[in-house]
Amino acid sequence: MSQSPKLHNAMWPGLVGKGDDEGQEPPISLEHMLDLTAAAEVDGQKFDGIDYFLFLPHTNPEATDGELKGIADLIVSKGFDIGSLVAPIWPGTVGDSAMGTAEQRGKFLDAVKMACRIAKIFNEHGARKYGVIRIDSAEFGVEKWGEDSAANTAQIVETFKEAATIAAGHGERLAAEGEICWAGMHSWKDMLDVLEGVGMPEALGFQADLAHTYLYTLGYNAPEHALLQEGYSDEEFWAAYEQMTDKLRPWTIDFHVAQNDGEVHGAGDHDKTGKHCPADDPNGKLDITKCSGYWLKDASNRGIKHICWDGCMFPNATLENPETWNTILKAMIDVRDAHGWE
């Protein structure tokens, strides 16, 4: 039985798209998300750890060292390691657009510095032994980017180079999340242009999510880069999937298992992105185990030590249902059994 990669659950589904605005559900606390994750068990196997968004209400990114060590103690007490961290790079958190003004880009870099500081505390505490720090362009939507795509991509590349240099100085690696809502990262081709433009694979790589990268093949937000057309056959799908993963897999250093029903979805300020579905959703378009294999080929050579489930945008009732987590854990065990390593 494979022991690697370790199986993690994300904490941010308790936060993203949640809030106090009309039509939004309230956030779920970090401790409750930890308890929901800890309760999951399939044939004696449990989640090994959690991935974690460094922002309120789960974490104040300006928390003291002592407060952060207390959070690490809480997570460890539930039986978990800490893996990948999500830097608070977005407007409204600490950061701002990576293709914005000098002031905005400065805020983006400040958020990366904060994440590196927290990572160091968790690492020295012993709670975190692996994982990356996740970023994206923090420029929502492609309209502004499209006004001068070459110049705006160059600006994102420059910001990412500075961010990667900061991370490398802290012994960390950044992973850029491939999601169709982030400018300059909204198609497989634009994402590749950014990764190659930065050209620092030891410090900045790609974070692949099954739900989001499925929409890359369909060309949402970038029809010119579509690899599939509506009504595609099974044979066409796997040919397109192989084409996409062959381009992005060499850069992939962080991986999210997920399901997608082919729809775009959003809540709050997190709009028009891949709709994450329950692992057993009857409308799911992906063979989770088979698709994961395309990304996890040679994964250990790229430093991947864990994989994470992303249930972003799940309703609270789904998150609160214990069966949700048992089903997810089973899907992840299936992925590890098929593609794991010793």
Image (cartoon, helix red, strand yellow):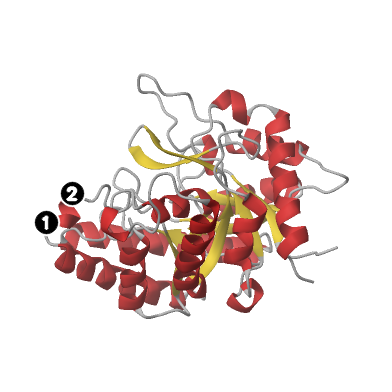
Marks 2 and 1 in Cβ contact (< 8 Å): yes
Q: Residue furthest right?
A: 44
C-alpha separation, residue under disc 2 versus residue under disc 1: 7 Å
- Residue at image x 59%, y 38%? 30
Quarter-wise, where is residue 297 in the image?
Answer: bottom right
Left or right, 35 with reference to 61: right
Residue 204 in the image: above or below residue 228: below
Badge 1: residue crowd in 10 Å (few <14, some 14–19, many ≥20): few
Left or right, 334 with reference to 168: right
Observer-nearest of 101 and 222: 222
Residue 217 position in % (x across, y down): 41, 55
Residue 37 position in % (x across, y down): 70, 40
Look at mark 1 in the image and give the residue it sits on. 147
Res. 204 visible in picture: yes
Identify the mark at residue 143; answer none if there is no mark.
Answer: 2
Observer-nearest of 298 and 235: 235
Left or right, 55 with reference to 319: left
- Residue at image x 36%, y 80%? 199
Q: Residue furthest left?
A: 147
Q: Amino acid at mark 2?
A: Glu
